[in-house]
Image: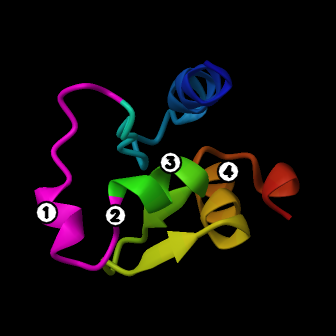
Amino acid sequence: PLCATEMDALQELDWRGRLELVDCSAAGFDDRVVAGEGVTREAMMTRLHARDPEGRWLKGLDAFEAVYAAAGLDRAAR
């Protein structure tokens, strides 16, 4: 629930439309595409994952920094 609440808040702050947030805990989440890129649903459930505009996967703190910066929260990202 905390993650879903944070996702909603970040989506509302993303007035530039830079984020596409996906809930990997949702029943309809299909992990076949990401599994082909070496990312598992289990890994996503334990650590934040984000893909940058170049398609690279960011994990943990790097992902938080990128997501918060994209939402316009530069200070929080640092």
Q: Toward which corner of the image does residue 48 lie, by quadrant?
A: bottom right
Q: Nearer the viewer, residue 5 or 76?
A: 5
Residue drawn 42% across and 75% down?
57
Whether 77 is among the magenta residues is: no
How far separated are the C-alphas under marks 1 and 3? Answer: 16 Å
Residue at left offset 87%, top offset 54%: 75
The residue tagged 2 is 40
* Residue indicated by mark 3: 45
Task: Give left or right: position of 34 versus 49.
Answer: left
Q: CA distance from mark 4 to mark 3?
A: 19 Å
Residue 14 higher or lower than 72, as above or below: above
At label 4, the amino acid type is Tyr
Name the image quarter holding residue 22.
top left
**Label whose residue precedes the other's in the sequence (4 or 3):** 3
Cα distance, mark 1 to mark 4?
25 Å
Instruction: Give the mark nearer the N terminus: 4 vs 2.
Output: 2
| Tag 1–tag 4 contact (CB < 8 Å) | no
Q: Is residue 39 magenta?
A: yes
Looking at the picture, which amino acid does disc 2 mark? Thr
What type is the residue that disc 3 sits on? Met
Q: Residues within 10 Å of mark 1 (few under 14, many from 20)?
A: few
Q: Earlier in the sequence, mark 1 or mark 4?
A: 1
Residue that numbered label 1 is attached to: 33
What residue do we see at 73% from left, 67% from top?
Answer: 61
Write the start and end of the magenta stretch as one range: 26-40
Q: Is residue 37 above or below residue 47?
A: below
Counting from the top left corner in percent of width and height, residue 1 is at: 61, 18
Residue 68's mark? 4
Q: What's the amino acid at mark 1?
A: Val
